[in-house]
Image (cartoon, rainbow, N blue to C red):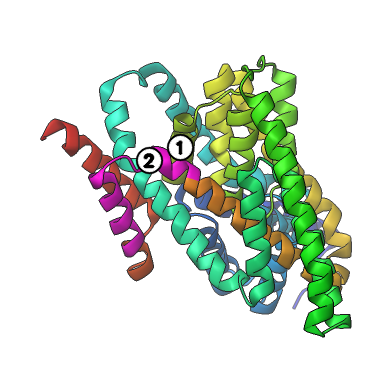
């Protein structure tokens, strides 16, 4: 066989990165347009494409990547897409994979947000969300149900989740609950490992929990005193960017954990949204493909138009790009550190408690009569038994809402 000339070899070397980048572009653009169903469905689709069909990574490496993305805050399926793009095509692949996976959902949500703001006063829009919102409640409840079976292994995570849930309803800061819960979980695990005698553990845990409850009641008093005179904070693009940058930098676990932060900051503290608008935003995020975190696009448009929508989206996803770039050099070592896994267990238990708190609160606004309760119950049963794509359940809920007002 004739040897390849240096010129042709060089051309082939330059074409390989370009070819890999095009592969990344087309794959994640396709997934960005078709990946309905939430993070679990996204990860399953990526596994099918990059492990079984294209064989970019092995099954073991893919599982390791999921573990790494769970160690950092942000939307796990989006970070997995970004990481896969980086491994396939380097730094350009990192950017292209993320943009292509996020972009289609952002554009769809932006169009829906425009329609919501422009035509939201029409009765038909309220009819649609009358049927959709109970389905969203069922979807969140199903996510909590599935995650709970993984997270709640033993009494310690259950006790931590109950404590975090109680403190959440007393008005304790969500970020403090998330990271404070993780630290408390790690400390208790350490104490149990060193002093397994029940009496010694109890003598330490009971005063500690008492201190937490006392702090919770003090926070509740402060919350009640200030809540009565709270007014809507002025909306500026700088505040919008920083608020969503914080969300993207600290939210662990499922995308539904974001709801706790959104409600605390945007509904209770800044008063930029109502609970109904937050529910509508979550409904739109469920209905569209791609990351659930594109809820930021919808909320940004509702509170500040096109500029706020674009800034909110950029701020929400920017930490994911940065964190993947930072974590890659130390990823293999992070997976071997025992205390990292322990803290992550605590974060997951606290995040699940926050999700439960938000579910209870938004359920009060979505489940308003017998029909909405029935829709939520049927949707939950369908998710447990048949595991359908959530998009079809949301469409069914919309039809039920329209029929409820058109026919009856």
Q: Are marks 1 and 2 in contact (CB under 8 Å)?
A: yes
Q: Quadrant of residue 188?
A: bottom right
**Kind of element beneath mark 1:** helix
Mark sitting on residue 179: none
The residue range painted magenta reads 361-381
Q: Residue at x 27, y 23 (%)?
A: 123
Q: Position of residue 77 (x, y in %)?
A: 61, 56
> Image height check: is 247 above or below 325?
above
Query: Circle 1 is placed at which residue position?
Result: 279
Quadrant showing the C terminus: top left
Provide residue 185's location: percent of width, then percent of height.
Answer: 77, 66
Above or below, comparing residue 190 to residue 160 in the picture:
below
- Quick check: 250 above or below 276? below
Q: Residue furthest left?
A: 407
> From this viewpoint, which residue is outermost toward the bottom?
197
Per the model, the C-alpha gap separating discs 1 and 2 is: 8 Å
Q: Quadrant of residue 211?
A: bottom right
Magenta stretch holds residue 347: no
Q: Residue at x 58, y 36 (%)?
A: 263
- Residue on which the image places disc 2: 366
Viewer-proximal residue among 75 and 23: 75
* Rendering coords of residue 145 (x, y %): 49, 65
Closer to the chain start, of discs 1 and 2, is 1
């Amino acid at each position: 066989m004739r040897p390849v000339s240096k010129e042709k070899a060089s051309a082939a070397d330059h074409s390989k990165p370009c070819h890999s980048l095009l592969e990344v572009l087309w794959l994640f653009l396709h997934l960005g347009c078709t990946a309905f169903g939430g993070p679990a469905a996204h990860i399953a689709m990526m596994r099918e494409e990059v492990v079984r069909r294209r064989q970019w990574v092995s099954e073991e490496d893919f599982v390791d990547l999921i573990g790494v993305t769970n160690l950092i805050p942000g939307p796990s399926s989006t970070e997995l897409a970004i990481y896969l793009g980086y491994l396939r095509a380097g730094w350009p692949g990192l950017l292209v994979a993320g943009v292509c996976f996020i972009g289609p959902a952002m554009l769809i949500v932006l169009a829906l947000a425009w329609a919501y703001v422009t035509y939201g006063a029409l009765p038909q829009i309220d009819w649609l969300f009358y049927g959709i919102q109970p389905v969203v409640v069922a979807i969140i409840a199903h996510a909590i149900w599935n995650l709970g079976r993984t997270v709640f292994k033993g009494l310690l995570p259950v006790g931590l989740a109950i404590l975090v849930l109680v403190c959440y309803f007393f008005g304790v800061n969500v970020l403090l609950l998330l990271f404070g819960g993780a630290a408390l979980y790690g400390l208790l695990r350490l104490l149990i490992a060193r002093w397994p005698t029940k009496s010694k553990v109890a003598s330490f845990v009971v005063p500690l929990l008492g201190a937490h409850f006392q702090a919770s009641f003090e926070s509740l008093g402060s919350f009640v005193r200030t809540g009565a005179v709270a007014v809507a904070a002025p909306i500026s693009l700088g505040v919008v960017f920083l608020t969503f940058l914080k969300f993207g930098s600290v939210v662990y676990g499922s995308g539904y954990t974001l709801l706790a932060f959104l409600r605390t900051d945007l509904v209770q503290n800044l008063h930029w949204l109502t609970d109904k608008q937050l529910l509508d935003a979550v409904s739109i995020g469920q209905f569209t493909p791609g990351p659930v975190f594109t809820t930021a696009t919808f909320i940004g448009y509702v509170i500040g138009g096109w500029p706020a929508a674009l800034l909110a989206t950029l701020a929400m996803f920017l930490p994911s790009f940065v964190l993947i770039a930072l974590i890659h050099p130390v990823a293999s070592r992070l997976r071997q550190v025992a205390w990292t896994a322990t803290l992550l267990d605590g974060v997951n238990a606290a995040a699940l408690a926050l999700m439960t708190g938000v579910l209870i609160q938004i359920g009060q606004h979505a489940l308003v009569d017998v029909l909405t309760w029935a829709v939520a119950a049927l949707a939950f049963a369908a998710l447990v038994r048949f595991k359908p794509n959530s998009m079809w359940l949301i469409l069914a809920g919309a039809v039920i809402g329209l029929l409820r007002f058109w026919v009856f």
